[in-house]
Image (cartoon, rainbow, N blue to C red):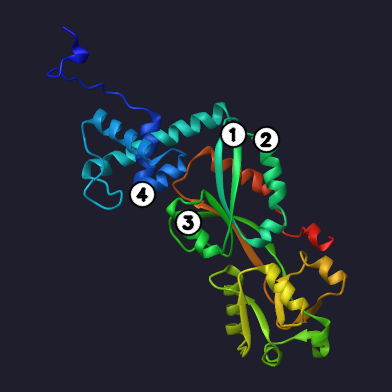
Amino acid sequence: MNISSHNSFKFRIHCMTLKQLQAFYWAAKLDSFSIAADRLFISQSSLSKRIAELEYSLDKELFDRSARRAVLTREGEMALTSVKLILDTESELRGKLKPGSDLRGNLRIGIGELTAATWFPRFVARIAIEHPGLLVDPQVGQGRSMEVDVERGILDCAVIAGLPTRPSIVSQQLPSVEFSWMGSPRLAVTGRTITPSLLRDYPVLTFAAPSGQAQLFNDWLTTNGAQVDRVSSCNSIHTIVELAIAGLGLCLLPRQHLQPVLARKLLVEYKCVPAFPALNYRLIWRHDDSRGLIQTVRSLVMKEVNFDLTTPLWGG
């Protein structure tokens, strides 16, 4: 009898693969088949097929197919903890035997404009040398929106200003950045010292919310009882620089990064009383992301991070 062609004879092969487990795990953690497929660099149909094969192997439905998003069944909830242990063990073993040597695919990393204009090109160049199979896909955005994208799995990690606010996110501290008040010489700021009361006399250019810079600025205003009547917000450091050079307002800018502009006397740096605090930066990722990719990125970021670098476009 030809078993393979006999329709009345069915048998089940009880085996599972790491690819199936990964597909199930990330679909469950990210609540989305499509986002999980993007994270694993496969099509959504391939991810669905792997999950279906795993369910067939276990003879259990792991997802409720009637829901609009990836909702686990009771059996799926039970399986998730065990699957995570398996994947963590596999990642640990791979890290011991082949640390970082097989990184391939795409790294989706969120960065702000200051990161993009300072140390990020060196970071990408180092990856190209040490991990040529890994391609970097940078997404430039604002801290809070990038934090959401990391939580959802759209980004693998991100560099943000300030502390993360979501419990699913963990972070690694990066160097802080000193900001100074600056403006065009044509503004002729009296005494060249910025005080909370002085800000009422000039237009102010600020970073747009919900950025870490905007939050720090608002906290400084509140703490010192400052009132600003004319405020323009923008989500681009370099646009703020151009507006400030044009004499359209005072602004807070990263002092080391702007040294070439200050040296050319396009902008003037002012003292600030009370002093404006430094802004802390963080590398963030999901707390349940134990991939070797994240560990490698953390190590390489710490080797290259330097917010004091300037951009060649300014002659620095």
Q: CA distance from mark 2 to mark 4?
A: 32 Å
Residue bearing the label numbered 2 = 130
Q: Residues within 10 Å of mark 4 (few under 14, many from 20)?
A: some
Question: Picture coordinates of residue 143 (x, y %)?
Answer: 55, 63
> Upstream in the sequence, badge 3 or badge 4?
4
Q: Residues within 10 Å of mark 2 (few under 14, many from 20)?
A: few
> Upstream in the sequence, badge 1 or badge 2?
1
Pointer 3 and pointer 2: residues touching (CB < 8 Å)? no
> Upstream in the sequence, badge 3 or badge 2?
2
Q: Is residue 27 left or right of residue 102?
A: left
Residue bearing the label numbered 3 = 149
For label 2, the SS is helix
Residue bearing the label numbered 4 = 32
Residue bearing the label numbered 1 = 100
Q: Amino acid at mark 2?
A: Glu
Question: Picture coordinates of residue 36 (x, y %)?
Answer: 41, 44
> Upstream in the sequence, badge 1 or badge 4?
4
Q: Residues within 10 Å of mark 1 (few under 14, many from 20)?
A: some
Name, please, the residue furthest toward the left.
Answer: 8
Pointer 2 and pointer 4: residues touching (CB < 8 Å)? no
Q: CA distance from mark 1 to mark 2?
A: 9 Å
Pointer 1 and pointer 2: residues touching (CB < 8 Å)? yes
> Upstream in the sequence, badge 1 or badge 3?
1
